[in-house]
Image (cartoon, coloured by chain):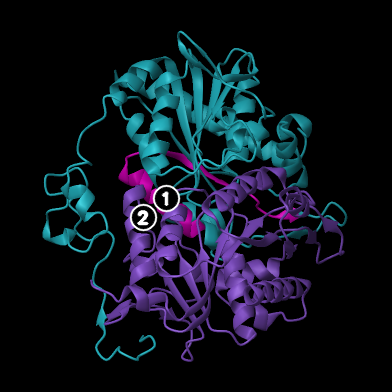
Chain colours: A purple, B cyan
Amino acid sequence: MEANNDGSMSQVRHVVLVLSGKGGVGKSTITTELALALRHAGKKIGILDVDLCGPSIPRMLSIGRPDVHQCDSGWVPVYTDAAKTLALMSIGFLLEDPDEAVVWRGPKKTAMIGQFVSDVAWGELDVLLVDTPPGTSDEHLAVLENLKKHSRVDGAILVTTPQAVSTGDVRREITFCKKTGIRILGIVENMSGFVCPHCSECSNIFSKGGGEELAKLTGSIFLGAVPLDPLLSTSIEEGKDFIQSFPDSATFSAISSISQTLLESLQTA
Amino acid sequence: MLGKSQVCLHSRRLNWRPHQNCPGTTSEQAGKSSSCAGCPNQKICASGATKAPDPAIAEIGEKLSTVKHKILVLSGKGGVGKSTFSAHLAHTLASDSTKEVALLDVDICGPSIPRIMGLEGEQVHQSGSGWSPVYVDDNLAVMSIGFLLSSPDDAVIWRGPKKNGMIKQFLRDVDWGDLDYLIVDTPPGTSDEHLSIVQYLSSTHVDGAVIITTPQEVSLQDVRKEIRFCQKVKLPIIGVVENMSGFVCPSCKNTSQIFPPTSGGAERMCADLDLPLLGKVPLDPRIARSCDEGKSFINEVPDSPAAKVYQSIVQSIQDYCSNRVTEEQSTS
């Protein structure tokens, strides 16, 4: 369908990619939590979920599978609330059966992502967060190429866990950013230690220190570490707003501080 | 739900869906049927680019005829422990020195296997009979794109077709020799790598897939898609492994469900889908450490609860493979 290409992103102030390279480090979780934290700070946020094979964001925001509508300015994103403070687009909304696999090769994924970027009428947003699948392939190239046509990309946040197996992949993602001209806004270390709720002993289940070392090695900013928190995992599972439910937790402070730093670097760029 | 309505007086439901009435990318009607309208792939299908069979499939069938058992390790979800599991499956099978085992890593963008197997920095050599895999032990060989990269910072920024070409080369050009087991570790998803590995192995017999998950619904929702993918491409499923299944605090010994099974975990999913649950592996910080150090956790801490579960899972897989051979022999 014909869309006003300049219109779809023209009122989006900032675009931030959430990348990793490594799977399962918490990109979607961090994207969701940052979106909720930024919204709590009074911002209008959008999330574009370009993980076509494993779209996790709809469940994390308790959105289910509403119909997607089209209007003259494009596809209407799905809003989490009547005040339209948080908008989302995901292939999850286009699947009739949630268990159906999207078994697509690269070119089809590229074309779908092109549509997501050019045809969704985001309207006025302070920040559009783009959640990505792991890797450095079709989805990443497609989203970058299409975003650059319509808007500038402020930069990327890289998510890792502390282990070397994870930082090993994230180093390659950092190279991807450098090669494609994406500014690295910083590194977030997720699953950074587990404090036993029974005895408060801290266990480094996924090793320790990798995020900070990676930041030092690559000259990037270390945005902060988010601990392994079963309360966060449960909120994400149930699609609840962790920020509202657990404002006194260490996890909330970590996420809040990361979102503040992110906002500051977007505003001073 | 309506978006910001400066011009949205008339909105209509977006009717296109990813799968409705797709004639199939290799059919005569590909790209041309009425249900193709609006599909992002329409142009590509209509051009005929998707139809021709690849001669490499037969070559690979020939090359791998000396491989007795092929096992794919899949998930759908990232970070659930596919590579960790693949590596430990390989180590355990190879602990029987009479067996020849190989591990092929087809995660082109995020090749973890070299590190986990303690082979970082190794390079691949070429001989008259093809590419030589890298040997961990006399009877355990490994191949990964990681061995073809000159620096740990090198990014493989490849689109689908180039990744497919690499996978084809791994299967056709590596001198695997006679193998009892070829284990294939895959990246998360249901895309090029998965389609290619199934296609390129289509003229060989694949024993089946081991599906890895963690207990949460966020993982299971992706894993169900992977299971559907297996069913679609007629890949048998050997069973499901639930990783990160609870954490026992080393200090107070209480168990915490860090990744809570809010929808019943793999147990409920397997019951719903009538699939075997091969085992539930608990979280153990020594697993991550072993992987980072390139050591076998099962060798390092053989008496730990996690190592025991791994061993029992590997036994189930071996039994499955032997039973398949027995069935084939009795029916032929």
Tell me which amino acid carries mark 2. Thr
Percent x, y for residue B195? 36, 40
- Quarter residue A98 falls in: bottom left
Front residue of this view, candidates A244 and B266:
A244
Q: Are marks 1 and 2 in contact (CB under 8 Å)?
A: yes
* Residue B186 position in % (x across, y down): 49, 39
Foreground pick, B207 / A10: A10
Give the answer, above or below, for where A49 lies relative to A142. Answer: below
Instruction: Name the residue: 61% across, 30% down.
Output: B150
Relative height, residue B126 to residue A221 (above, below): above
Residue A21 visible from this viewpoint: no
Q: Tell me the residue at 78%/58% (across/down).
A: A193
Q: Is residue B3 visible?
A: yes
* Chain under disc 1: A
Q: Please tell me whether residue B225 belongs to the stretch shown in magenta.
A: yes
Real-space CA distance between mark 1 and mark 2, rounded to the nearest whole angstrom: 6 Å
Range of the magenta residues? B220-247
- The label shown at residue A138 is 1
Same-subunit check for callouts 1 and 2: yes
Chain-order first, disc 1 or disc 2? 2
Residue A110 disc label: 2
Q: Foreground residue, A32 or A20?
A: A20
Q: Amino acid at mark 1?
A: Asp
Left of A129 or right of it: where is B287?
Answer: right
